[in-house]
């Protein structure tokens, strides 16, 4: 019975921390783009690096034909 005097306040504190963490993450837009990380593993990093290194390729695409 004395154990409940310890467990109940500890549980209330943990629930409070959990609610605070959820509200913080919701306010800071942590749940806005849930699919970004899932799709990011499908693309190679080499393509992103190559696109950043060659600025001429974007200029050629924007030029009228």
Image: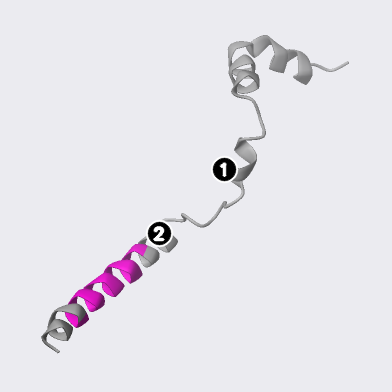
Residue that lies at the very extreme toward the left in this rendered image: 2
Q: How is the image coloured?
A: one colour
Given residues 9 and 53, the one toward you in this image is 9
Q: Residue at x 14, y 79 (%)?
A: 6
Quadrant in the picture for residue 64: top right
Q: Is residue 7 above or below residue 23?
A: below
- x, y percent for residue 26: 44, 62
Query: Is 24 drawn above or below residue 6 in the view shown?
Result: above
Q: Position of 60 compared to 32: left or right?
A: right
| Residue 52 percent across, percent down from the top left | 59, 17
Mark 2: secondary structure: helix
* Mark 1 residue element: helix
- Residue 46 drawn at (x, y percent): 62, 18
The part of the chain drawn in magenta is 8-21
8 in relation to 42, above or below: below
Which numbered mark, 1 or 2, is in the foreground of this view? 1
Q: Which residue is mark 2?
A: 25
Residue 37: mark: 1
**In the image shown, does 26 or 56 lie closer to the viewer?**
26
Residue located at (71% from left, 13% from top): 57
Q: Residue at x 19, y 79 (%)?
A: 7
Q: Quadrant of residue 13?
A: bottom left
Quadrant of res 10: bottom left
């Amino acid at each position: 019975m004395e154990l409940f005097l310890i467990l109940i306040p500890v549980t209330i504190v943990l629930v409070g921390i959990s609610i605070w963490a959820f509200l913080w993450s919701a306010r800071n837009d942590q749940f806005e783009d849930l699919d970004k990380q899932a799709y990011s593993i499908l693309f190679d990093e080499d393509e992103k690096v190559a696109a950043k290194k060659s600025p001429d390729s974007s200029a050629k695409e924007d030029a009228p034909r």
